[in-house]
Image (tube, grey):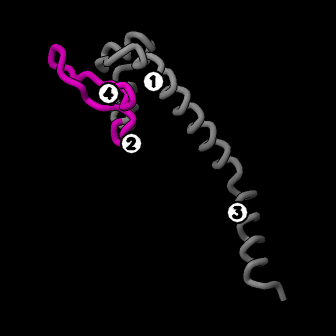
Amino acid sequence: MKSSTENRAALLKSLREQHQTSVNATQALLKELQAVRKVIRQVMQAGSKTIPEIAATTNLPTDQVLWHVIAMKKYNLVTETGLDDGYYRYSLVEDAKR
């Protein structure tokens, strides 16, 4: 009889094989999201930007830029640095500390 560790390992291997398509799709999506955030960070390295400024520079839809910037704010990668014509300006956290 297999030990519980061996049973667990076999079960996990089986689950990975069964769900390989989902795992691959999730990894591809994560890679895409990371690439978009990298582009946004590159744009923001020139200084603080509003959501419309980032969208115009990156040619990404404004709602997509907003979603990414808010996610980056949640993880303390960007911070609000003021208002400009009713739009918040966002800076990279390392830039805001200078």
Q: Is residue 91 visible?
A: yes
Disc 2 versus disc 3: nearer the observer: 2
> Which badge, 1 or 3, is on the more N-terminal residue?
3
Residue at image coords 25%, 29%: 80
Residue at the limit of the structure toward the left, as seen here: 86
Q: Which residue is mark 2?
A: 75
Is-magenta flag for residue 77? yes
Disc 4 versus disc 2: nearer the observer: 4
In the picture, the quarter occupied by the N terminus is: bottom right
Is-magenta flag for residue 96? yes
Q: Is residue 67 visible?
A: no
Disc 3 residue type? Leu
Q: Which residue is mark 1?
A: 41
The 10 Å Cα crowd at callout 2, few under 14, some 14 to 19, many 20 or more, is few
Residue at image coords 62%, 42%: 27
Q: Which residue is mark 3?
A: 15
| Quarter of the figure with residue 11 | bottom right
The span picked out in magenta is: 73-98
The 10 Å Cα crowd at callout 4, few under 14, some 14 to 19, many 20 or more, is some
| Quarter of the figure with residue 82 | top left
Helix or strand or loop: what does disc 2 sit on? loop
Q: CA distance from mark 1 to mark 4?
A: 13 Å
Disc 1 versus disc 4: nearer the observer: 4
Disc 1 residue type? Arg
Q: CA distance from mark 4 to mark 3?
A: 45 Å
Q: CA distance from mark 1 to mark 2?
A: 14 Å
Disc 4, disc 2: CB below 8 Å?
Answer: no
Q: In the figure, is residue 57 to the left or right of 24?
A: left
Q: Where does residue 86 sit, x and y in percent of width and height?
A: 15, 19
Disc sitting over residue 96 in the figure: 4
Residue at the limit of the structure toward the right, as seen here: 1
